[in-house]
Image (cartoon, helix red, strand yellow):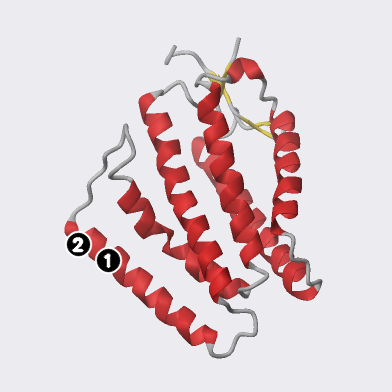
Amino acid sequence: MKNEEQSRSLFGISLSDRPTWQQFLICTSGFFFGYLVNGVCEEYVYNRLQFSFGWYFTFIQGFVYLFLIYLQGFTTKHIVNPMRTYVKLSAVLMGSHGLTKGSLAYLNYPAQIMFKSTKVLPVMIMGAFIPGLRRKYPVHEYISAFLLVLGLILFTLADAQMSPNFSMIGILMITGALIMDAFLGNLQEAIFTMNPETTQARKRT
């Protein structure tokens, strides 16, 4: 029921008694800090330690996700969508992560981040074909996204002249990851749109 109070927690620590803005600030700060640490560790492992097994890295990351889900208190009773939906999302997510991490054996980290930053354009394009969304954007938004992507491509081409870790294999891998990311983001939004019961908030009993 919408009127029922919902419990929100992070790694077992309740956030329900905090104002909404504090919950938002804590979660977003944790996201950006974790993303920064993850990026530094990835570049060190791939470029300094010369580790090139991106799929193995992704395999270990999957178990870390399971552990964090366990700490969050998620159980099968919280599943509100068909299991095939979660399997599809998981396969695309792991494929995206595997290709992204594997590309660091061929690209340096700044070049990889620049490519990942172009995700806005494939997300916008694919959003028009995902059932449940069929989203359309104004022409000027497509133009803005295209100019953003063009600028990042020019940056990457310049990087190719001076980076020792730049190759077409890395570009193909990160492009595949971008396509999967575009599908993943739109599919997640479609699931939340079509089934409002899909939420991380747990109702108090």
Q: Position of residue 8 (x, y in %)?
A: 59, 28
Left/right of residue 71 with respect to residue 107 in the rendered view: right
For disc 2, the marked residue is 140
Q: Do residues under tags 2 and 1 come within 8 Å of each other at their CB atoms? A: yes
Residue 26 percent across, percent down from the top left? 60, 45
* Residue 192 sits in quarter: top left
- Rendered residue at 48%/50% (across/down): 180
Query: Callout 1 environment at 10 Å: few (<14), some (14 to 19), or many (20+)?
Result: few
Q: Is residue 174 found left or right of 75 in the rendered image?
A: left
Where residue 56 sits in the image (x, y, percent)?
75, 52
Q: Would you call the spot at circle 2 few (<14 residues within 10 Å), some (14-19), or many (20 or more)?
A: few
Name the mark on residue 198: none
Residue drawn 52% across the image and 70% down it: 171
Label 1 SS: helix
Mark 1 sits on what residue? Answer: 144
On the question of residue 12 being in view, the answer is: no
Q: Is residue 113 above or below residue 186?
A: below
180 or 152, which is in the foreground? 180
Give residue 194's position: percent from left, percent from top.
36, 26
